[in-house]
Image (cartoon, rainbow, N blue to C red):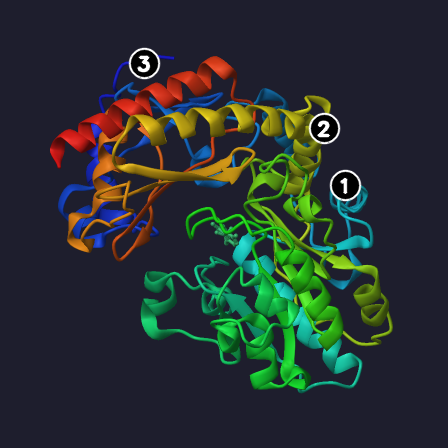
Amino acid sequence: MAHKALHTDKDLLKKDQKHFLHPTSNPKQQAKSGASIVLRRGQGIYLEDIEGKRYIDGLSSLWNVNVGHGNKELAQTAFEQMETLAYASSFKGYSNPSAINLSEKLAEIAPNGLNSVFFTSGGSESNDTAFKLSRFYWEQVGKPEKKKIIALERSYHGVTIGAQSATHLPAFHAFSGSHMNDVYHAVPHLTDCERGNKDADHYERSIRGVIEREGKETVAAVIIEPIQGAGGIYVPPAGYLEAVRKLCNEYDIHFIADEVICGFGRTGSMFAVEHWDVVPDFMSVAKGITSGYAQLGGVLIHDKIRKVINDFDGVLAHGFTYSGHAMACAVGLKNIEIIERDGLVDRAKEMGEYFGDRLEELVTKHTSVGLTRGMGLLRSIELFKDSKSFERFDPQDNAAEKLYQHCFDRGLLVRTSGGNGINIIPLAPPLIISQPEIDELIERFSAGITAFEAEL
Ligand code: PMP
């Protein structure tokens, strides 16, 4: 895969600096020195930059390239669909075979009862759609005052104004002072509180506490990532999601599962809620639905909601130009076919266990690695100044950023998470990763950690 640098490399960097404002990046740094990396091709778990340097894609890019890079079947599917019909509207009752077939397939693989889908172009749009459909449902059943959304602290649900208001990572939440009203945050994973233990610490800030404070007649939905992703990979304790499901039933509130990262095999089941046998009312999907080969998201809708929607004799005034995009849906369908045919869900489980064991070794080997968390191929490690006493680094140390750079230098792309002295490195390689490739990833990661520790 090694290719000589293009003679336009310098031009590319200059043009990038001048014309491309990067998302979730430091604009001052970009304006000064341009992109940190320009990627030009990918194959399997590897990416290659314009200078020919190869990297392991330790996060499946943005937790989405589940089947790995360079998949020719997906390219061929996109080509054929584009050649036949790249795009068609799905407004006003228009439809197309790819969108229809994908919606049927999603109903087949989703938990029981989630039999229809509203297509979007990504995760943020899916969550905004879920909020709107939830509120719309409550209006239809004569409870228009049910508007409030409860999300969890540390959550990430996207950046459109609705989704951003539910997101609770400090920088995203604060950005530009753009807020949707009626969004509240609860402390995650307080299973006892959710079960009704009013004496427990933080009861008032638990989901149950927030519902009781705000009044159940004002709350539309609770939104939860089954495993919190961007916040640092937090797996809920046993019984938590089940308790929230029961709580939502008790108070007549919708349960929205945000499976944008977890879906399509990532955690070792097709959808993460399956680990806890929980059936949500809405399930947001995106990312892994096409393995990133096309921009697509959706909200899966439970039959009991669809039934009420079906009684509405007016225009459902919500929809994106690219809802049900023919090419994206064709790619999504083929992608799910590949995940099923190649056994990638079981593989994520099996390789995930091996990956988890190898990460545990790093906890023993490196003094700065305090713990590792996760499920399937969705994992993280957490760094500490002293991992024995779990003493945290000073926020100014920027420990996770430093380790990120050492990994980058060694050809391993990861991600940082946390902030305020909490230093987490999430890892989520493509589901096609093999055992020797995991070993190679761990080798680079461990070398990065050794260099990081030497720098301290
Ligand atoms: N929900 C979750 C759990 C996510 O991780 C993300 C993206 N990282 C989103 C929603 C937003 O998705 P998008 O960036 O496609 O809008």
Judging depth in this view, the residue of 382 and 141 nearest the camera is 382
Compare residues 278 and 62 and report the one nearer the observer.
278
- Name the residue beneath numbered marker 3: 3
Q: Is residue 381 above or below residue 150?
A: above
Query: Marks 2 and 1: in contact by CB < 8 Å?
Result: yes
- The residue at the point 59 percent across, 52 percent down is 226
Mark 1: secondary structure: helix
Write down the residue under mark 1: 109
Indicate the amino acid at tag 3.
Answer: His
Query: In the rendered structure, which amino acid carries the disc numbered 2?
Result: Glu
Which quarter of the picture shows residue 301?
A: bottom right
Q: Residue at x 42, y 48 (%)?
A: 232
> Does residue 50 appear anywhere in the picture?
no
Q: Secondary structure at mark 3?
A: loop
User: Distance of mark 1 from mark 2, alpha carbons?
Assistant: 10 Å
Label 1 CA crowd tier, 10 Å (few <14, some 14–19, many 20+)? some
Q: Nearer the viewer, residue 260 or 229?
A: 229
Placement of the C terminus among the 4 image quadrants: top left
Point out residue 222 in the picture as x, y percentages from the top left corner. Answer: 61, 68
- The alpha-carbon separation of the residues under discs 3 and 2 comes to 33 Å
Sequence-earlier tag: 3 or 2: 3
In percent of width and height, residue 435 lies at: 50, 16
User: What is the number of the mark on residue 340?
Assistant: 2
For residue 262, say whether it is visible. Answer: yes
